[in-house]
Image: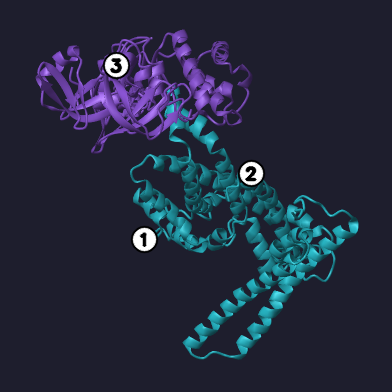
Amino acid sequence: MKSVPDAKEKPTNILEWLISNLAGLFISVAMPIITFGVLIIVFKWLRATTPNTMTEKVLVSLVAIVWGVGGALILYLISNKVVEQLPPKWVKLLQPFIFVGPAVVILLWYLALPAARTFWISLFNRDGTQFVGLSNYVAVFTERDMLEAFRNNVLWIIFGASLSVIAGLIISVLADRSKFENLAKSLIFLPMAISMVGAGVIWNFIYEVKDVADPQIGLLNAIMVLFGGKPQAWTALNQPWNNLFLIVILIWMQTGYAMVIFSAAIKGIPEELIEASRVDGANELQIFFRIMIPYIMGTIITVSTTVIIFTLKIFDVVWVMTGGQFGTHVIATQFYRQAFTNQNKGFASAIAIVLLIAVVPVMIYNLKQFSGKEAF
Amino acid sequence: MASVTYEHVTKRFGDVVAVNDLNIQVADKEFLVLVGPSGCGKTTALRLLAGLEDITDGKILIEDKVVNDVAPKDRDIAMVFQSYALYPHMSVYDNMAFGLKLRKYNKDEIKRRVEQAANILGIESLLDRKPKQLSGGQRQRVAVGRAIVREPKVFLLDEPLSNLDAKLRVQTRAELTKLHQRLQATFIYVTHDQVEAMTMATRIAVVNQGVLQQIDTPQMLYDKPNNLFVAGFIGSPAMNFFDAHLRKDGNNLFVDTGTFSIKVPDEQAKIYMPHVNKAVIFGIRPEDIHDPKYEAPGIIAELVEGKIEVTELMGNEIFLYLKSGEHNYVARVDPRTSFKMGDDVQVSFNMGNMHIFDKETEQAIR
């Protein structure tokens, strides 16, 4: 009988450890490079054929897809086969690199490198010609426009994120007991299907304001006038509370997301648990707060962090509604303005890095939740 | 403590009648077991009493008060669920204290009661743990503990033993009986396991398809089943049934199954005489069929010829699977028997314990 190597066996000496890791690194880097190389060659060849008719185009695309996916697959199969020829111990050490190594390397290339580069740029002046140290960051935290953006982002999180989560929770609980559950949930989920820009346009019409003499085509002002009020410029007046009118749009869109996830969690609460608490003497409110909420706490945290991350990054709604005017700028719109309007690459990069750093803790917490529950 | 009364209680789910015109009177301090096959409506009957389902028709009374429209929390009942339904985010202590906290008992009283209950159930050392850190048996105790701290008028138990392994089940069965005696409370217990019913109950209510079949003490239910269903449901292995008719021969009455004919003892013959020539079902329990060599003294034995198809040694007894003509039946005989598989033998039927059911109505003829 052959002895089977212990699965937990570790390389015994430094040299072996070094070789295995170097080989792993080589596989991780070489694999995508070879793949890309082959893909590019075929891409050039395909380009050279210049399809004319529709059939030719479809044919060429099909070949491209089959060759692209199949080529990568074959490459992985072959390298896997090669590694499998090695002694079992080496297979154990190298096989992970074949499977996840290339993905990790590509991910680093697309995510980590740009982030590092952004940080590098943030240390330079507007066109990258002069090293300025951290002065861009000083500006980020002292400029009036930026402070306004931070304040607004805080408003977005306090009102936008929390109200979306609370509304989603309440609606999911109520819908769970309704006969029209599916209809109600579909309607509330519907805004999720609309793009942020589309939502901005819709709400622009709702908040539209016309001269007092003219008929009001904005829904909100039409209602105001109907009840004898005066038309208001909702998104311009009464700063900073005009932000709330923009935040409503986010709530309108995010409540559906929160509701759907909460709904699933609430359906996962065993019916007997609710019944037991009812027999124990709990009324509906006590059941909600003392049984249901603790039971779905993990989901609440997950949804909250997801919505908070989303809210921190909010851009489209503000850009479409006000373009950041009337004190409605947020971090992301400031970033855009600095990068593309102002052409101040250093300052814009500093804003982007600050936003990244603001998101990271929430993200880490969120990931911990995910892995803890193995929910996703 | 209190009595419970079901008066013409009916529960329909759409077109399905789950409980049909149920009439039961449970006396104070009684241990009533509702037993029946899965889906017979016994759990629904319990849930109606708990207030977890609305009654379609009829009345339920706890003591003398109609509780149809009383919320579960105001019925002064406690329920132990099949899945135990412990609150997963609360410690054992908080699980047990939850009902008391909601009822605004003061802290010392809650502590006293929880500790007392934990003491009765032997779970004092588990009070700080969360339910998921407990074994099945421990969870079951906590679920019972949660019920007893409230000191309710009526305890409702919905198959509380079905999630335990066989050994623990037997042990817990005895403990629940002890608990009932100790608490002197009214227990209503739902199970599909007739052994649990037989061992624990003061009285058993057998339910089938939403209809109460018979309610009586375990012994009466066993000895004098009202109908074919109860006869077949109570007892394991189940009672043997033979299609037969009653034949009169001179002064004697015989049960004629087509393959064999057995004389009915004179005492029973008097009762069955009016039903001569009627199609009936003859029933006899496996333990009333003996190896003639080891039959119990004093029984009215009649010999029947059969072939042994299978034998099962249980240790303290042997099950014989016999065949006589068209009829298959089981005998539960003394383990000293020399009967072997494949033997053609004579077994003796203890006709003193025979049962006759009307074939049409399936009711016992007495």
Q: Nearer the viewer, residue A80 or A54?
A: A80
Chain under label 3?
Answer: B
- Using the rendered image, report if marks 2 and 3 lie on a common chain: no
Chain under label 2?
Answer: A
Q: Residue at label 2?
A: A372
Q: Which chain is purple?
A: B
What secondary structure is marked by label 2? helix
x and y, in percent, of residue A244 in the image: 53, 49
Total labels drawn: 3
Q: Nearer the viewer, mark 3 or mark 1?
A: 3
Tell me the quarter of the picture where residue B228 sits.
top left
Which quadrant would the N terminus of chain B be assigned to in this image? top left
Residue B99 vertical placement versus A231 (above, below): above
Residue at position x 40%, y 22% in the image: B195
What residue type is disc 3 on? Answer: Asp
Residue A23 vertical placement versus B277 (above, below): below
What secondary structure is marked by label 1? loop
Is any part of residue B93 visible from this angle?
yes
Q: Nearer the viewer, residue B311 or B139?
A: B311
x and y, in percent, of residue A374 in the image: 60, 47
Chain under label 1?
Answer: A
x and y, in percent, of residue A90 in the image: 78, 61
Q: Nearer the viewer, mark 1 or mark 2?
A: 2
Residue B223 is labelled as 3
Q: Nearer the viewer, residue A213 or B304?
A: B304
Give the spatial CA distance, label 3 vs label 1.
Answer: 91 Å
Residue A215 is labelled as 1
What residue type is disc 2 on? Answer: Gly
